[in-house]
Amino acid sequence: MLSGVCPQAHLEAHGIQVLVDQPMVGQGVADNPMNSVFIPSPVPVGLSLVQVFGITKSGSFIEGVSGSEFGIPVSDGARRLANFGLFSPQTRAVEAMRRLDRRAFRGGFILEKILGPVSYGHIELRSTDPRANPAVTFNYFQEAEDMER
């Protein structure tokens, strides 16, 4: 989008020179919605990459990943967490997670990724700063079929 290839009105709204008016750039964004279950371990677990180990009749992928401590403090005094793995740092659960002992984050996840949603979203620029993330809207469950699946 910053290159000048995008819907013309969106580029002009950000003061970007229009090189090519491409109305579909940033449209039709889709990802696989995911459900996850964390399985804690009393001992450290070997690191594994995400691996598919099953596919349901409805086409959902069942995957597993293990070995990361999903909330490692940056420093014990600050109690700041480097990351929560699959957890978004904007969720309400984060505050509760910060109070837990780091051993609570040892283990792995079983994931279900729902195959190709029917609902689609879009991407828009928030600013012309190339370091800034764009606004992304997935609209995962806008269509009833996605809710049923």
Image (cartoon, helix red, strand yellow):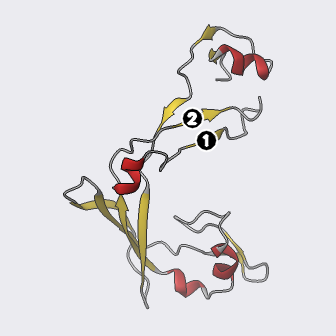
Picture coordinates of residue 74, whole percent (x, y): 70, 73
Q: In this rendering, is residue 126 above or below 90?
A: above
Quarter of the image that includes the C terminus: bottom left
Q: Are the residues flagged by discs 1 and 2 in contact, CB closer than 8 Å?
A: yes
What residue is rendered at 38% in x and 75% in y?
Answer: 46
Say whether disc 1 or disc 2 marks the residue closer to the N-terminus.
2
Q: Which amino acid lies under the numbered mark 2 shown in the image of this protein?
A: His
What residue is rendered at 68% in x and 85% in y?
Answer: 99
Picture coordinates of residue 4, whole percent (x, y): 66, 15
What residue is rendered at 29% in x and 57% in y?
Answer: 61
Outermost residue, front side: 144
Q: Horizontally, is 96 left or right of 66 in the view?
A: right
Q: In this rendering, is residue 98 above or below 17?
A: below
Q: Horizontally, is 12 left or right of 8 in the view?
A: right
Mark linked to residue 136: 1
Q: Which amino acid lies under the numbered mark 1 shown in the image of this protein?
A: Val
Q: How many marks?
A: 2
From the image, tell me which residue sits under label 2.
Answer: 122
Tell me the crowding category of disc 2: few under 14, some 14 to 19, or many 20 or more residues within 10 angstroms, Cα based.
some
Mark linked to residue 73: none
| Closer-to-camera residue (116/99) | 116
Outermost residue, left side: 57
Q: In this rendering, is residue 3 above or below 53?
A: above
